[in-house]
Image (spheres, grey):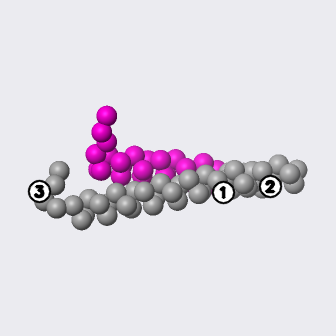
Amino acid sequence: MRISVKLSVILAAIFAVACFGVAITGFTSVADVEDPVRRSDSLGFAWFWAFLGCVAVVFGAIGVWLLRTQKEGDA
Protein backbone atom coordinates (compact mmCIF):
# COMPACT_ATOMS: atom_id res chain seq x y z
CA MET A 1 0.00 0.00 0.00
CA ARG A 2 1.37 3.39 -0.97
CA ILE A 3 0.45 6.58 0.84
CA SER A 4 0.50 9.80 -1.16
CA VAL A 5 2.33 12.85 0.10
CA LYS A 6 -0.95 14.74 0.56
CA LEU A 7 -2.37 11.93 2.68
CA SER A 8 0.79 11.78 4.78
CA VAL A 9 0.54 15.52 5.49
CA ILE A 10 -3.10 15.13 6.53
CA LEU A 11 -2.31 12.13 8.74
CA ALA A 12 0.64 13.98 10.31
CA ALA A 13 -1.65 16.92 11.12
CA ILE A 14 -4.28 14.66 12.69
CA PHE A 15 -1.62 12.84 14.72
CA ALA A 16 -0.06 16.15 15.84
CA VAL A 17 -3.44 17.49 17.02
CA ALA A 18 -4.10 14.28 18.95
CA CYS A 19 -0.63 14.34 20.54
CA PHE A 20 -0.86 17.99 21.53
CA GLY A 21 -4.33 17.35 22.93
CA VAL A 22 -3.00 14.60 25.19
CA ALA A 23 -0.04 16.80 26.18
CA ILE A 24 -2.26 19.76 27.06
CA THR A 25 -4.54 17.51 29.10
CA GLY A 26 -1.49 16.15 30.90
CA PHE A 27 -0.08 19.61 31.64
CA THR A 28 -3.40 20.95 32.92
CA SER A 29 -4.07 17.96 35.16
CA VAL A 30 -0.68 18.09 36.90
CA ALA A 31 -2.00 20.60 39.43
CA ASP A 32 -4.43 17.98 40.77
CA VAL A 33 -1.67 15.47 41.60
CA GLU A 34 -0.36 15.80 45.16
CA ASP A 35 2.28 13.06 45.18
CA PRO A 36 5.62 14.47 43.93
CA VAL A 37 6.63 11.20 42.24
CA ARG A 38 3.34 10.91 40.38
CA ARG A 39 3.53 14.61 39.46
CA SER A 40 6.99 14.09 37.98
CA ASP A 41 5.77 11.05 36.07
CA SER A 42 2.77 12.99 34.79
CA LEU A 43 4.98 15.81 33.56
CA GLY A 44 7.26 13.34 31.83
CA PHE A 45 4.24 11.75 30.14
CA ALA A 46 2.97 15.15 28.98
CA TRP A 47 6.40 16.17 27.66
CA PHE A 48 6.67 12.87 25.79
CA TRP A 49 3.36 13.52 24.00
CA ALA A 50 4.42 17.10 23.26
CA PHE A 51 7.61 15.70 21.72
CA LEU A 52 5.61 13.28 19.57
CA GLY A 53 3.44 16.19 18.42
CA CYS A 54 6.55 18.15 17.43
CA VAL A 55 7.86 15.16 15.48
CA ALA A 56 4.54 14.96 13.62
CA VAL A 57 4.71 18.68 12.82
CA VAL A 58 8.24 18.29 11.44
CA PHE A 59 7.22 15.37 9.22
CA GLY A 60 4.13 17.28 8.07
CA ALA A 61 6.29 20.28 7.23
CA ILE A 62 8.64 18.06 5.24
CA GLY A 63 5.63 16.71 3.35
CA VAL A 64 4.39 20.23 2.57
CA TRP A 65 7.88 21.16 1.37
CA LEU A 66 7.95 18.10 -0.88
CA LEU A 67 4.55 19.03 -2.30
CA ARG A 68 5.66 22.57 -3.10
CA THR A 69 8.98 21.58 -4.67
CA GLN A 70 7.54 18.72 -6.70
CA LYS A 71 7.69 19.30 -10.45
CA GLU A 72 4.50 19.45 -12.49
CA GLY A 73 5.29 16.24 -14.41
CA ASP A 74 6.02 14.22 -11.25
CA ALA A 75 2.99 12.56 -9.76
State the extent of the magenta-drawn residues as a range: 1-25
Q: How crowded is mark 3: few (under 14 residues within 10 Å), some or many (20 or more)?
A: few
Q: Distance between the residues labelled 2 and 1?
A: 11 Å
In this rendering, would 56 be left or right of 1? right
Up-down: is 2 above or below 50?
above
Q: Is residue 34 in view?
A: no
Residue found at x 31% / y 64%: 65
On residue 73, the disc is: 3
Q: How far apart are marks 1 and 3 (CA)?
A: 42 Å
Q: Residues within 10 Å of mark 1 (few under 14, many from 20)?
A: some
As drawn, which residue projects farthest toward the top?
1
Residue type marked 2: Ser
Residue 4, image x, y percentages: 28, 45
**Which SS class for mark 1?**
helix
Q: Which of marks 2 and 1 is nearer the N terminus?
A: 2
Q: Name the residue under label 1.
A: 47
Q: Distance between the residues labelled 2 and 3?
A: 52 Å
Q: Name the residue under label 2.
A: 40
Residue 61, image x, y percentages: 39, 61
In this rendering, would 75 be left or right of 46? left
Count of numbered labels shown in the rendering = 3
